[in-house]
Amino acid sequence: MGSIVFLVIVAAVAFWAIGLYNGLVTARNAYKNAFAQIDVQLTRRYDLIPNLVETAKGYMKHERETLEAVIQARNSAVSGLSAAKANPGDAAAMQQLAQSEGALGATLGRLFALAEAYPDLKANQNMMQLSEELTSTENKVAFARQAFNDSVMNYNNQREVFPNSLIAGMFNFQPAELLQIEAPEKREPVKVSFT
């Protein structure tokens, strides 16, 4: 009788530990999935930028430096996204992505500010469509980033609370980093207006 009670207790503890482990795995997979949504939106954004620059080139012939800076910032952001995609939640990767996104936002802001001086460019149908798509994508990126940060917070909370912290420590569940833009002025989406 005593050995049956002991086996039931051991089985209950094993199922409890398995449940905690599976909860941690589920939370980790949720933030990785949320990052995949950021990846989709940022990739779309990066794909729009060369078309935007090509459209602007015909009108902004003496603004070559700005156009090149936009493409360089875009390429840097693509690299930052690749590093973050390899290890979502890694602190260094999230910081690199946030910095490259901030630089891209700043160069796009300069491009749109300069475009204001070119009435024909502002009226160009292709430019207006690309600007609209970029603005829409910026909003989707913001929502995806919020969903990712919520998932990371949930995972980190599950990882740190007792008794989950015991299982997390035994199976090396590392903390995940939020995706944050560093400066408050960089948190605002790029303003696109040709009206």
Image (cartoon, grey):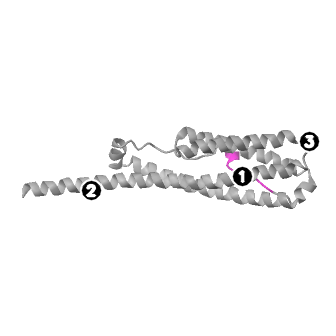
Q: Estimate how packed mark 2 is, as few (under 14), some (14 to 19) or many (20 or more) residues with alpha carbons within 10 Å.
A: few
**Residue highlighted by disc 3:** 62
> Residue 126, located in which quarter of the rendered image?
bottom right
Q: Identify residue type, mark 3.
A: His
Q: Position of residue 181 (x, y in %)?
A: 63, 45
Q: Identify residue type, mark 1.
A: Asp
**Residue highlighted by disc 1:** 47
Q: Is residue 189 magenta?
A: yes
Q: Nearer the viewer, mark 3 or mark 1?
A: 1
**Residue highlighted by disc 2:** 15
Q: Which label's residue is closer to the chain start, 3 or 1?
A: 1
Q: Element under label 3?
A: loop
Q: Which label's residue is closer to the chain start, 1 or 2?
A: 2
Q: Is residue 100 left or right of residue 174?
A: right
CA distance for labels 3 and 1 = 24 Å
Q: Element under label 2?
A: helix
Q: Element under label 1?
A: helix
Image quarter of the C terminus: bottom right
Give the residue at x 79% y 58%: 130
CA distance for labels 1 and 2 = 47 Å
Query: Which residues fall within the magenta stretch?
Result: 183-192
